[in-house]
Image (cartoon, rainbow, N blue to C red):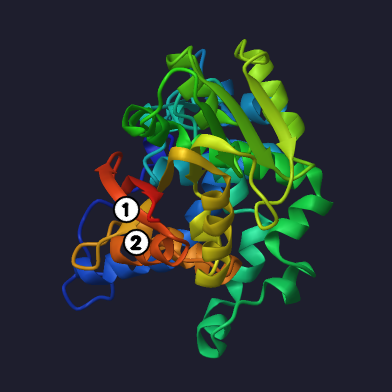
Amino acid sequence: MRQWGRPDMSVDDTRPPPADEPGAGDDYDRMYQLIMGAWGSQVVRTMAGLSVADHLEAGPLTAEEIASRASADPDMTYRVLRAGVALGILSYDPDDRRFSGGAPLALLRSGSARTLKHYAQASAGPVFWGPALLMPETVARGRNHVTETLGCDVFEYFGRHPEDARLFSAGMTDLAAPVIDGAVDAIVAEDGQAVVDVGGANGALVCELLRRRPGLTGTVLDLPHVVPGAAEHAALRGLGDRLTATAGDFFAAVPPGDVVLLKHILHDWDDAACVRILSNVRAALRPGGRVHVIEMVMTPAAPSVSAALTDMAMLFATTGRERELPEYAGLLAAAGLRVSRVTPIHRPYAVIEAVDAG
């Protein structure tokens, strides 16, 4: 492998370019980095796939050592790791040629409570990458190109590709971790009530709610290829006797319950589909029941970067969108529900509580 960074071969690249050279201004550099940001996503995805954070947990390693543990090419591994240094994810010691990880890298560690390892792999993977490449054409015609690139919509694709579905489900669980704490605190539920997690994937939200409130029981409703993961997750958390995993379609019906949870569901669908889902939720609500919608809430005057970029993913990969609060209120009203409370949690998320408007 090539040797770089020896003390006698170092290059001083810290001097600013002359004022008349491209790249001299902060705006130029920022725009250039935004343009190249897609490659940065692939660097992070590759590091997650190589489990670099797990390999470095015990201490610094050379690129060759990491490549050997990850069954990868040493020279290309070195180049990816060097890019990780440039992105501020890793540090490098030129004397012993070892890489080490800082706080950002810990977020790609498998065992981290706030890991983003699976989300890094899923969000920058082929399921979303292909449709993203056609984003200009999508905006021009007002409809995405998912069917052209995948042969079907995203959710059908996951039904046909269980490993991709597993990775996506794990990625969404990663993403939800900081949201769940605040959501559980905001959810109104009383002992003896039944909670239904609609489209709940592996049931991370309802399981945490049941763990903190022993008087509740729960149901996860999701597609047939998803529910085994929910049952397994509940069993691992000792909740198998209080949680049921049910295969179904929320466009057809929702199991009855006192508390219905919709986390990261409505943003996947267009308005008409959302009203259909919410109408089925309303029909499933027992007297006095509550719906809790947990989503990013767009604020047009100062939109968060995470919400705005997630909205772009919705644009090129689904029929949905990230919405502003009045838009959610309108969807709920169209389904016969009214907003009773809004609780901001981990920005830009909020818990929108609704009850039967009748």
Crowding near the residue tagged with mark 1, few <14, some 14–19, many ≥20 C-alpha atoms within 10 Å: many
Q: Residue at x 66, y 77 (%)?
A: 145
- Left or right, 40 with respect to 296, comes to right
- Point out the tag, 2 or 1, that comes first from the N-terminus: 2
**Residue placed farthest to the right in the image?**
160
Q: Position of residue 121 (x, y in %)?
A: 61, 45
Whole-percent x, y for residue 216 in the image:
50, 19
Q: Give x and y (percent) for residue 64.
A: 64, 29
Amino acid type for the residue under numbered disc 2? Ala
Residue lying at the far left of the rendered structure: 19
Residue behind mark 2: 329
Q: Nearer the viewer, residue 79 or 299?
A: 299
SS at mark 1 in the image: strand
| Quadrant where the image shows the C terminus | bottom left
Labels 2 and 1 touching (C-beta < 8 A): yes
Q: Which residue corresponds to mark 1?
A: 339
> Mark 2 to mark 1: distance in Å?
6 Å
* Residue 104 location (% of width, % of height): 39, 33
Q: Secondary structure at mark 2?
A: helix
Residue at the spot x=28%, y=56% of the render?
A: 304
